[in-house]
Structures are given as C-alpha cells and as structure tokens.
Image (spheres, rainbow, N blue to C red):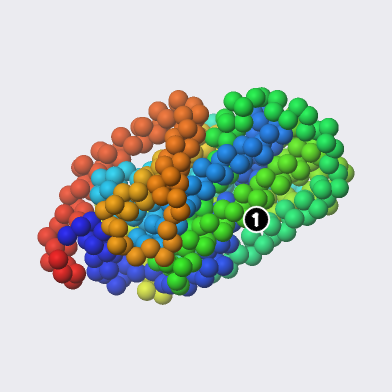
Amino acid sequence: MDLFRKKAIIDSVDGETHLARCLSALDLVLLGVGAIIGAGIFVLTGIVAATQAGPAIVLSYIVAGLACAFSALAYAELASSVGGCGSAYGYAYAGFGELLAWIVGWDLILEYAISVSAVSVGWSGYFNDMLRSMKIHLPEHLLHSPASGGIFNILAMGIILLLTFLLIWGIKSSSRVNNLMVLVKLSVIVLFIIIASSNVNPANWTPFMPFGIKGVMEGASLIFFAYIGFDAVSTAAEEAINPQRDLPRGIIGSLVICTILYIIVSGLLTGIVHYSRLDVASPISHAMLLLNYKVAAGLIGVGAIAGLTTVMLVLFYGLTRVFFAMSRDGLLPAFFAYTDSYTKTPVRIIVLCGIAMSLIASLVPMGDLAELVNIGTLFAFITVCAGVIVLRYRQPDLPRSFRTPFMPLIPVLGIISCSYLIYNLPLFTMMRFGIWMVIGMIIYFSYSRFHSHLHTKAVVETEVIPE
C-alpha cells in the first residue's frame, strides 16, 4: 500500500480526532489576509526602505511576492488533492514519506511558534503606545524581557493567553473575530492610501535604488517575513466546508490581495517621506505625523494593533493544527490528538502552545525571536514545491481540482527563488536552524519512529482500502 493511502487511513480511524467543517471560501481568504498583513506592512516596510532598498522596496516586495506565488500555486494543488490539517507536513508525508514529513513538521512548529512570539513583542509596543496616549502608564520592568532591562513583558504574555482562550472557544468564533479585525486594518490601509496619494513628492523617489541591486535582494529576504502566513490557510483543510474548491481560492486570493497592497503602500510611503527617515518601528503612523495628520496616525495605530493581532491568531491556529496532525500520526504523543466534544478544537495542544509561547514572548527579545522565522518558512516552501513534482509522477491519477500551471517550471522556479533567499540570510541564522533540526532528529529516532502509526501493527489491521 502506498504512503498516500496509508495516510488517508491514519487520518480517518478515530472519530474523536476530527475537526468541524465550518469555514467558507471568504473565511479562508480573510484568514490568509489576516496572517499576511501585519508586521510586514506596519513595521518592516520602513526599516527595509531606510536600511536596504530605498524606494526600490517595491522591487523587493515583487521579488519576495514572486517566490511566494510559485510556492502558493504548489500549495493550492496539494491542498486540493492531499488535504489534511498538517499543511506542508501532510504534503511531505504523502510525497516523500515519514522522515521528511517529520523534518518539515518540526520546522513548521518552529516557524509558527517563533512567529507568534515575535509578533506579540511588537504588538506589546503598539498597545503600550495606545495606553500611554490614554494616560495609562505601566511599569517599564513589566514591558521588557530580562535581556532588555525588564523582568518580563506582561503585554506580550497577555495577548497570547487571550488568543489561547479564543482558539479554545472554537474556530468559527475565532474566524469571526479575525474577519472583523481584517476589515479594520484594511480600512486604515485604504485611509493611508487616500491621504498619501495626494501628498506624493516624486523627488523622494530619487535615488530609486540607493543600495544597488544587492540591497533590493537582501531587502527581499527580510521582506519575505511579510508574506509568512498564507501557508497557514492550508492548515484549515479539515475545517473548510469545500476544501478542494475553496482552499486554492483562499491561498491564491489572499496572496494576490496582500501583494498588491504591499506594493502600493511601500511606493506611496517612500513617495511622501524620504526613505532615510523611515527607520522607525511604526513607519506609516510616523509618516502621517510628519504630514500633520494626527487623527489618521492614531487610527493607523489602531489598525496596526488589529493587524498584528490577526497575524498572531492565524499563525497560532496553524501551529496547533500542524501539532495536531503530527500527534494524530503518532510522531508526537497521542495524548494531544484529541478534540473537545463541544468546541471540536484540540484543547490540550492549544493550552500547551499558549503557555509555552507566552513564556517565550515575555522573556526573550524580539530580535532573537525573529531571526529563525524566514529560513523555516523558505525550507517548507521548497519542500512543497518539490512535493508537487514528486506526486505528479507517483500519483498521476490523484484527483486534483486545482493543477499548478506550467509544470514543472513553476515549482522549479519556486525552489530556485526560495533557495536564493535562504542564501541571502545570515550564516548565524542557518546555524541556529541547524541546531533546531538536530534536536528534531534526536526526538524522531528516539521516540517518533517507534510510535508512528505508519509502522505499527494496529494501522495494518485497520486497513479499509483494498490493495
């Protein structure tokens, strides 16, 4: 029996490990937009423009967006055919087998957990600014990690614990909250576009590429962080009402919407304020203040809080679903492969991840957290692009409601572009990633391979699909 069919049996043997189908195509698109538009547009845009790309940041967004587009097409095909809540982990399982699936799943756990923790630290800064504008002042030692001169970051811890309760409540309720906050942040982005469009000074776009093509490419490697999250849509496969039709729409639709907004906003931002003045934590609000639009700056600050909240919510959601899929396959303790009878959510996993991430976020500086995120995501994208090619040859008759065009050119371009972006990342980041992978291999060969359902007699005895 091939891996794909065995995987299908594993996913269907236990009714207590099933998730509720309740998400529409619109929910999935907004889920993707919720994950993508956040720190990238409200924080990184100004920093990358000021230090690496200048006005040519629009090219950085295009380069990073193309790398994501190639991967998104691959994700869309696998989401419509393989399905499952494990995202790239499940696709690697079906295409390459258990060992590589473990590597990808272990990588995704790192990517999502560190992303949520890092964004929560940025969120705490924006939220504290809002509190201060309301004359509410928290003690400084409760706003920073020990390495930054504090005791712990109470706001970063608090938002993660709040999202923990929201996810326990149920995915449909979480989706409604996400949809509302997405509308808020899209509204403030439209407000910025309207105001900025009438205040552009073309002289600010000169020189267009002050750091050269090297700066554009290095900027693209960092800007890639802005796109992290669209793959989280694929973790909703088991909770989508019509996954074969709607998952490709959610993945590709959210990526297209966000790429267009990124290009427009970055172009206008460097058009209204010289790029050298944008190296600040809140560049869009900063630009509005420089133009003396104080009310708009305040509203954009609210939008940034909403934007960062949705990013954390969707990535937290993605983390729990990958963890759930790995537990259900036996690669992580089966104790976690359980869904609550009322909410249909993996409560045990949500609680464990929420506590762990809240502690990390409150005790570790954002810079140390963010370094590992991009390389983990790029590695997962490379695996998905390769998985599309492999499954086309191993499973040519597999039903595919969406097919990646121009095969195998598109996934090959995805592999090349993501590999190039990894090449532009710091060596120290690669070393940390390597250490995480070594830890994962130790866990796999000491525990996971012996508890995997794929290699137990119980799975063979429950085979319901004839040879």
Q: Residue at x 31, y 71 (%)?
A: 16
| Amino acid beneath label 1 | Ala
Q: Is residue 318 left or right of residue 438?
A: right
Q: Nearer the viewer, residue 103 or 131?
A: 103
Residues packed near mark 1 inside 10 Å, few (<14), some (14 to 19) or many (20 plus):
many
The quarter in which the N terminus is drawn is bottom left
Q: Residue at x 66, y 24 (%)?
A: 211
Q: Residue farthest to the front? A: 406
Quadrant into which the C terminus falls: bottom left
Q: How many marks?
A: 1
Residue 22 appears in the figure: yes
**Residue 61 screen position, x and y as percent:** 62, 41
Residue at 37% across / 51% down in the picture?
388
Which x, y percent locates residue 321? 40, 58
Q: Is residue 327 visible to the viewer in this orientation of the structure?
A: no
Q: In front: 395, or 12?
A: 395
- The image shows residue 183 at horizontal and vertical percentages of 67, 62
Element marked by disc 1: helix
Residue 149 position, x and y percent, is: 59, 31
Question: Which corner quadrant of the image does residue 12 belong to?
Answer: bottom left
Q: Nearer the viewer, residue 56 or 87?
A: 56
Q: Is residue 394 above or below residue 376?
A: below
The residue wearing badge 1 is 306
* 219 sits to left or right of 359: right
Residue pictured at 27% horizontal, 64% vertical: 8
